[in-house]
Amino acid sequence: MNLEAVRNFRFEPVFHTYTHRDTMLYALGLGYGSNPLDTSQLGFVYEAGLQAVPSICCVLAHPGFWARRPELEIDWLKLLHGEQSFEIHHLIPPEGTVKASYEIAAVMDKGAGKGAVLHLVKSLNDADTGERLATVRSVLFLRGDGGYGSFGNAPPEPSPLSEQSPSHVKDIPTLPQSALIYRLSGDYNPIHADPVAATKAGFERPILHGLCTLGIATRAILATFADEVPGRLNSLSVRFSRPVFPGETIRTEFFAAGGQVRFRSRAVERDVIVLDRGTAVLRA
């Protein structure tokens, strides 16, 4: 990694016009509509009274695979998506045009041979009014880029969860074709579709997108604590721990305390934690 090039790198603003169709497709990728008689699910996949799942802010106005830029000298083949968070400032409309501004806020060096952690911040605004819709933070683990130095101030790491029994549990099944649906929302990495590419990346078969798993956890929170009202979710953060295989059931375990909910998610069939150290903050 060329640390100075990374520090001085500037993103061009990204504009993204999306429609009701895109909003419904994103929700279908999260499994909404599995029960056609459940009107609370239909509210995210049917044009009458359509509302956007808040986690759509993570996929709107994507900057592309910028880490492959040669001047940055990032070993992008060893890049992992470690953590993700978003804060909703204003209800995201089901269609419109948004403008995203990106900034590399910090790089934390773990030492030669140990990698580095990069913090990327996206400010998502309504392109017409300028109103801030969301702030999205991504934490990227650069496994091959340790020993080159640090800059910026990183937020504290999320604290571990309690070992007590969860107060609530929500199971949401995924479909064998879930990754093929979700990738149509913008992430076309072949490891989510092509068995050969997945095998080369070290997986036995194509895996579900980490941001899809995050979206399913968002869905579980809305169903369990917010009566399916998107405006009640203020923020969410999570650490990615292991991949999900399409077709598995994702069980989200909650530890509620007032307006804050800690959570983790596991793949039921393998009994492995796939999301960890999650926190959701709710509005009254």
Image (tube, rainbow, N blue to C red):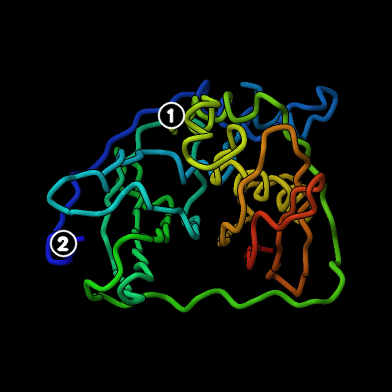
Q: Quadrant of the N terminus?
A: bottom left
User: Within 10 angstroms of label 1, few (less than 14), some, or many (20 or more) residues?
Assistant: some
User: Along the horizontal axis of the image, is 244 left or right of 182?
Assistant: right
Quarter where residue 45 is shown = top right
The answer to whether marks 1 and 2 mark residues whose Cβ atoms lie closer than 8 Å is no
Secondary structure beneath dot 2 equals loop
How far is mark 1 from mark 2, CA to CA? 27 Å
Which residue is painted at 73% across and 34% down in the image? 174
User: Within 10 angstroms of label 2, few (less than 14), some, or many (20 or more) residues?
Assistant: some
Quarter where residue 6 is shown = bottom left
Image coordinates for residue 34, horizontal then vertical, percent: 78, 27
Establish if 133 lies above or below 18.
below
119 or 3: which is nearer to us? Answer: 3
Identify residue type, mark 1: Tyr
Q: Circle 2 is placed at which residue position?
A: 2
Q: Quadrant of the C terminus?
A: bottom right
- Dot in front, 1 or 2: 2
Q: Circle 1 is placed at which residue position?
A: 188
Mark 1 or mark 2: which comes first in sequence? 2
Quarter where residue 107 is shown = bottom left
Which residue is painted at 47% across and 45% down in the image? 57
Which residue is painted at 15% across and 46% down in the image? 70
Image coordinates for residue 271, horizontal then vertical, percent: 80, 53
Which residue is painted at 74% across and 74% down in the image? 258
Image coordinates for residue 168, horizontal then vertical, percent: 85, 60
Q: Which mark is residue 22?
A: none
Image coordinates for residue 74, horizontal then vertical, percent: 24, 54
Secondary structure beneath dot 1 equals loop
User: Along the horizontal axis of the image, is 6 left or right of 214?
Assistant: left
180 or 101: which is nearer to us? Answer: 180
Identify residue type, mark 2: Asn
Establish if 236 lies above or below 51.
below
